[in-house]
Image (tube, grey):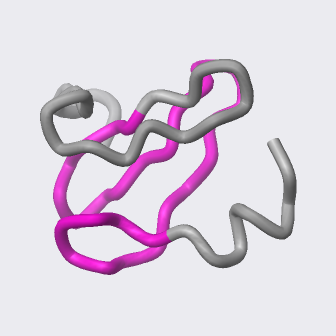
Amino acid sequence: MDARLLDILVCPICKGNLDYRKADRELVCKPCKLAFPVRDDIPVMLEDEARPLGPDEQ
């Protein structure tokens, strides 16, 4: 995933910073406790596509 893109992306819900988890191919918003998928190097920043983080992931 392009580092320049990571610098400008924010959570679509709270506008907070996102952490990129390369192994899981996800962008994680800790305040919202959501993980947004990255498919073919394209982040899917839709709330409906995000998965909730489990208690062990936070």
- The correct choice, above or below, for 38 with respect to 30 in the image is above
Q: How many marks?
A: 0
Q: Nearer the viewer, residue 56 or 16?
A: 16
Residue at 74% of width from left, 63% of height from top?
5
Residue at 59% of width from left, 21% of height from top?
39
Is residue 18 inside the magenta stretch? yes
Q: Which quarter of the figure has residue 25?
A: top right
Q: Is 54 left, or right, of 6 in this rendering?
A: left
Q: Position of residue 19 (x, y in %)?
A: 56, 55
State the predominant SS element of the stretch in magenta: loop
Is residue 21 inside the magenta stretch? yes
Q: Quadrant where the C terminus lies?
A: top left
Q: Position of residue 28 (x, y in %)?
A: 42, 47
Residue at 20% of width from left, 75% of height from top?
14
Q: Is 57 left, or right, of 32 in this rendering?
A: right
Q: Which residues are magenta?
A: 10-36
Q: Position of residue 53 (x, y in %)?
A: 23, 33
Q: Which quarter of the figure has residue 22?
A: top right
Q: Position of residue 57 (x, y in %)?
A: 34, 33
Residue at 31% of width from left, 79% of height from top?
15
- The correct choice, above or below, for 3 with respect to 10 in the image is above
Q: Quadrant where the N terminus lies?
A: top right
